[in-house]
Image (spheres, rainbow, N blue to C red):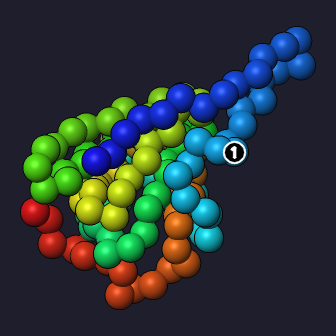
Amino acid sequence: MAQLIQLKTHTDKRGQLTVVQDEIPFDVLRTYYIQGVPDTTIQRGGHRHKKSWQALICLSGSCEIYNNDGISENIFTLNSPDICLILEPKDWHTMQQFSKDAVLLVFASTKYDVDDYIDQPY
């Protein structure tokens, strides 16, 4: 089941430092980010995985993640760089409603493998 986690942020007169260390429940083998989505009608994703776990952080701006784990459906709003959404392989998801300044960072537990993707929703 998808879950939001709060990342530790340290703030002082120099700014903020957010740490991603032990919060992600998998080893990271791939990192990518989505940016420059031209308008809010664009939808990304639309799949789930056989093996890959993912951790999503919206570093700038905001976006929504629609999630369906085969039992329940949820929409998560990511609008702060100290919030991380953990997706299990069974979590069919789309990424949408990107603000113009959105930068969505994704950590994945596996390297890219086209055979890991399941495109059919529940």
In the depicted structure, whether residue 67 falls above or below residue 119: above
How many numbered circles are shown?
1
The extreme right residue here reads 14
Q: Of residues 114 and 25, which is closer to you in this image?
A: 25
Q: Amino acid at mark 1?
A: Gln
Residue 93 location in percent, x, y? 28, 56
Please tell me whether mark 1 sits on a helix, a strand or a loop. Answer: loop
Q: Is residue 30 visible?
A: yes
Residue 39 location in percent, x, y? 38, 47
Q: Is residue 43 visible?
A: no
In the depicted structure, whether residue 42 falls above or below residue 80: below
Which residue occupies 44% across, 42% down? 85
Q: Is residue 61 left or right of residue 22?
A: left
Occupied quadrant, residue 106: bottom right
Residue 21 location in percent, x, y? 69, 45
Residue 69 location in percent, x, y? 20, 53
Q: Of residues 110 and 95, which is closer to you in this image?
A: 110
List the residue tagged with mark 1: 21
Task: Assess disc 1: are there few (<14), some (14-19) or many (≥20) residues with their C-alpha within 10 Å of its C-alpha.
Answer: few
Which residue occupies 10% across, 63% down? 122
Occupied quadrant, residue 12: top right
The extreme bottom residue here reads 115
Which residue occupies 61% across, 63% down? 27
In the depicted structure, whether residue 15 falls above or below residue 82: above
